[in-house]
Amino acid sequence: MEIQIQRIGLLRPEKNPKSCTLNLDLDWKIDYTDFGNNSVGYIFYAESEGGIPLKFKIEGNIVLEDSEKLPGNLSELLLDRGLNIMVDLFNITRDRTVSVQNELFSIEEFRGKVKNLEV
């Protein structure tokens, strides 16, 4: 069995909450779609209730080998994997300060430089 991820979406707060407690009371669901011969589509949704406002979605497929069957704990596997991805994605998308000490360009100057790099 192969679990594929085709799309990931994360709607996070505009600003990082500074004094907000991380409350992982989540409303979640998994919709199974597109039942093919050797594959099943899924959409995993998670939304936080209270604490940090957060909405998360994963779309993908589960591809089976020839005679393979779906495991009985498939929803638990997708939930576990989905929540791990959500937390990792939330952490890497937090606000970061980047200092730039190079030459600055206007958007038009930058657009011209990018066009020169295109093949």
Image (cartoon, rainbow, N blue to C red):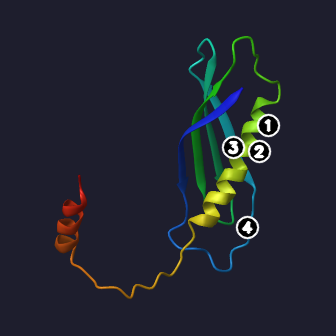
Write down the residue under mark 3: 28
- The three-letter amino acid code for the residue at tag 3 is Trp
Q: Is residue 33 above or below residue 108?
A: above
Residue 22, quarter of picture: bottom right
Q: Is residue 101 above or below residue 118?
A: below
Mark 1: secondary structure: helix
Mark 4: secondary structure: loop
Write down the residue under mark 1: 76
> Are the residues flagged by discs 2 and 1 in contact, CB closer than 8 Å?
yes
Residue 48 in view (yes/no): no
- The three-letter amino acid code for the residue at tag 4 is Leu
Write down the residue under mark 4: 22
Q: Comparing marks 4 and 1, which lies closer to the viewer? A: 1
Mark 2: secondary structure: helix
Q: Callout 4: few (<14), some (14-19), or many (20+) C-alpha neighbours within 10 Å? A: few
Q: N-terminal of the two: label 2 or label 4? A: 4
Q: N-terminal of the two: label 4 or label 1? A: 4
x and y percent of residue 73 in the render? 82, 30
CA–CA distance between discs 2 and 3? 11 Å
Q: N-terminal of the two: label 3 or label 1? A: 3
